[in-house]
Image (cartoon, rainbow, N blue to C red):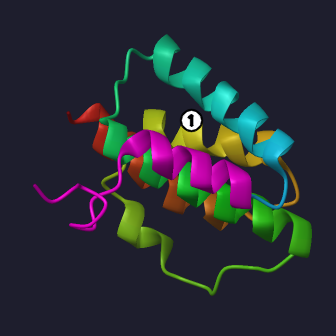
Amino acid sequence: MISNERRGIVDVHTQKAEILTNSPDREALEKTMSFIDGLLSEKDIKPTPVQYVVMMNHVNEMIKRSITQDRLPEFDLEMFADVSEESLGMAMQVVECIGKLSEEEGYLLSIHFETAKNN
């Protein structure tokens, strides 16, 4: 029998551990994900395990940008016109929690909340 790892399938717990291990600021990532967990619980939003890992990876990249002060390329915010105020608000709270990020970061992150809301 071929193992999941040999098939290229890695379980969610392994992916989370890898993201944490490779994070430039593990403490900030854990704090931010705990903050996100609170937001999700408060709004009764339940992302799938895969959605959660994708969001965690995105948040880790946001933390990297907050450290390096790299900025996202400009993009048209109209692309996010269909994102709910609730999802955008949650994302902006995360941007504030991390600090040193542009407002555009929140728009990109809001997609994760919006997707999880629609489960």
Q: Is residue 80 above or below residue 53?
A: below
Please give the name of the residue rendered at 33% of the width and 46% of the height, measured from the top-left corner. Answer: 50
Q: Is residue 41 magenta?
A: no
Q: In the displayed orientation, state which residue is furthest to the bottom.
A: 73
Q: Position of residue 66 (x, y in %)?
A: 84, 63
In the rendered view, would you say 38 is above or below 71? above
Q: Residue 92 lies in what quarter of the image? A: top right
Residue at screen point 63% across, 66% down: 104
Front position in the image: 53 or 94: 53
The reply to whether residue 28 is visible in this rendering is: yes
Q: Residues within 10 Å of mark 1 (few under 14, many from 20)?
A: many
Q: Which stretch is magenta?
A: 1-22
In the rendered structure, the answer to whether residue 55 lies left or right of residue 62 reads: left
Q: Where residue 59 sits: x, y (%)?
A: 63, 53
Q: In the image, is residue 74 above or below residue 115?
A: below
Q: Which residue is mark 1?
A: 90
Quarter holding the C terminus is top left
View extreme (left): residue: 1
* Residue displayed at 74% across by 44% down: 29
